Amino acid sequence: MTRIVFIDADGAEHQVEGAEGLSVMEVLRAKGFGIEGECEGSLACATCHVWVDEAWLDRLEPVSDGEADMLDCAFHVRDNSRLSCQISISKTLAGLRLRLPSPVR
């Protein structure tokens, strides 16, 4: 199990463990942290959008064209925006920090 740090939309910090090979989206959905993931990780929505801590961006796989297209549909996009369905849990990401953007009201 690999531990990551998730900061919810209210600013509360949570230590979350996930099995290697699962996506961050799968782990956060299972814990009930407000990640929708309506398309189940098939790159057909942007409901699993997160902000990745700047210190971790260069450790992730590059954004694919499909992910970039979906991020164009997301709200509150920043330079550190990623789709959590495209981030796979691995030992090299132990300590990864990410934040859920504020919900659109």
Image (cartoon, grey):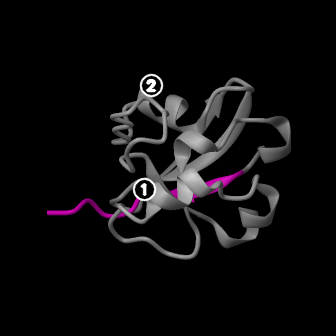
**Is 100 on the left or on the right of 4, as rendered?**
left
Q: Is residue 24 above or below residue 82?
A: above
Percent coordinates x, y for residue 32 in the rendering: 37, 32
Percent coordinates x, y for residue 52 in the rendering: 60, 62
Q: Which residue is mark 1?
A: 12
Q: CA distance from mark 1 to mark 2?
A: 18 Å
- Which one is in front, 65 or 48? 65
Percent coordinates x, y for residue 17 in the rendering: 64, 31
Region of the chain picked out in magenta, as a range = 96-105
SS category of the residue bearing label 1: loop
Q: Residue at x 49, y 75 (%)?
A: 78
**Is 12 on the left or on the right of 23, as rendered?**
left
Asked if marks 1 and 2 touch (Cβ < 8 Å), the reply is no
Q: Residue at x 66, y 58 (%)?
A: 63
Classify the position of the C terminus by image quarter.
bottom left
Q: Is residue 72 magenta?
A: no
Q: Is residue 14 above or below residue 40?
A: below
**Is 10 on the left or on the right of 14, as rendered?**
left
Q: Which residue is mark 2?
A: 30
Residue 82 in view, yes or no: no
Q: Amino acid at mark 1?
A: Ala
